[in-house]
Amino acid sequence: MGAADFGAGGKQPRQKRGSLAPKRKKKKRIGFRIDMTPLVDITFLLLTFFMLATRLSQPQVMEMSIPPEVTEVEVKESELLTLYIRGDGKIFYALGQQEPKEIPLSELQPLVVRENVRTESRLITALKVSPKAPYGRVIDVLDELNLAEIEITAQLAAKNIERKRRFALVPISEEERVKIGDLPENGNAQ
Amino acid sequence: MPKIKKRRLGISIDMTPLVDITFLLLTFFMFTAKFKTEAESQQKFVIERPKSTADTSKIPDKDLAIIKIAIDTVAMDTSYYYEMVNPKDWQQVLASVKDLPEEMRTAVQLKVGLGLLEKLIRQTRIVNPRTRFAIDADRRIEYRWVEQLMDVMRRQHATVFNFVTDKEGG
């Protein structure tokens, strides 16, 4: 409506012009077309460029905190779970002072959940990694522990127990490396 | 008598909807695009990040110091690299470290040993205490590199840090 009014208003000066030069009678341009092909060409070019240049998977982060000082803490034997990662990436676990036993990565999560629920969140998990172990394996284990955390929190919440996470990255000792067969001198004996 | 079909010369398709959609997508990709930083385009290594499934948070983009542990693709040696996201802080940190060679003062990323790394971390914490640290390490490196780095960070009281990972399958 507004546009129509505007169009009518626009006619006024044209008529005036027409009186000055009566021969030039302009045709009203209805539905004129612009060739959009070059526009589309350029737009697609830019679109392809940006699509390919964008990195879709943004890196994410896993937060980690370490104790400010290495301190000895007295731990109840029944409430300690030690996980070891050997130089070749194999994972071992030990409850309290038990001998380390090998465990596949896929069974780690149920084990951690079971032990945490059994001890009602008092379990301390210590992760001891051989200096030769691949870093990717360490992250795999940390990832499994993070996943287990969801399940533990849920199961403990059902029992009305508050979940406090107790986890530490502990340097591995020579003896422990021998125990899991990480040091070459004992590699043949086991 | 059969009708002679008229040849259709110069058909034109209305391209307006096509242009609409294309522009929409173009604007979307233009705004979401994140390009490589200067340091990333200079480095001679590719970090194969470890994969993680847990829904962790995204990497922060302000006040961040990144310590990279990577394997050089040419020389095949592992080393630490240090860079900071905030260029102002980075200049201050570089200026405050003594006995640094002149050509290293203009670099955006430094290849460092443990000794220099400790100095840099200390200065970073003096210049901007809110700086967060991220460890961006290759998944193939041996764990001792990370362990030594964590010892250094513990000495500098930078006890909270992030491991940079990639999403599994992404």
Image (cartoon, rainbow, N blue to C red):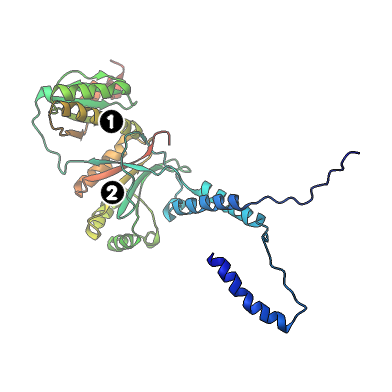
The amino acid at mark 1 is: Leu
Residue appearing at x 25%, y 26% in the figure: A84
Secondary structure under tag 2 reads strand
Which residue is label 1 attached to? A147
Q: Mark 2 belongs to which subunit?
A: B
Most distant residue in the right direction:
B1
The amino acid at mark 2 is: Phe
Q: Mark 1 belongs to which subunit?
A: A
Q: Is residue B32 visible?
A: yes
Q: Is residue B65 above or below residue B49?
A: below
Describe residue A171's horizontal placement relative to residue B141 as left or right.
Answer: left
Name which quarter of the figure residue A105 lies in: top left
Nearer to the camera, B7 or B169: B7
> Is the C-beta separation of discs 2 and 1 under 8 Å?
no
Circle 1 crowding by C-alpha within 10 Å: few under 14, some 14–19, many from 20: some
Mark 2 vs mark 1: tell me if same chain.
no
The quadrant the C terminus of chain A occupies is top left
Circle 2 crowding by C-alpha within 10 Å: few under 14, some 14–19, many from 20: many
Q: How far separated are the C-alphas under marks 2 and 1?
A: 23 Å
Q: Is residue B38 above or below residue A63?
A: below
Q: Residue B108, percent across and down?
A: 39, 57
Secondary structure under tag 1 reads helix
Residue appearing at x 10%, y 28% in the figure: A75
Mark on residue B133? 2
Q: Is residue B34 visible?
A: no
Q: Residue A165, percent across and down?
A: 17, 34
Name which quarter of the figure residue A22 lies in: bottom right
Name which quarter of the figure residue B101 lies in: bottom left
Q: Residue A54, percent across and down?
A: 48, 48
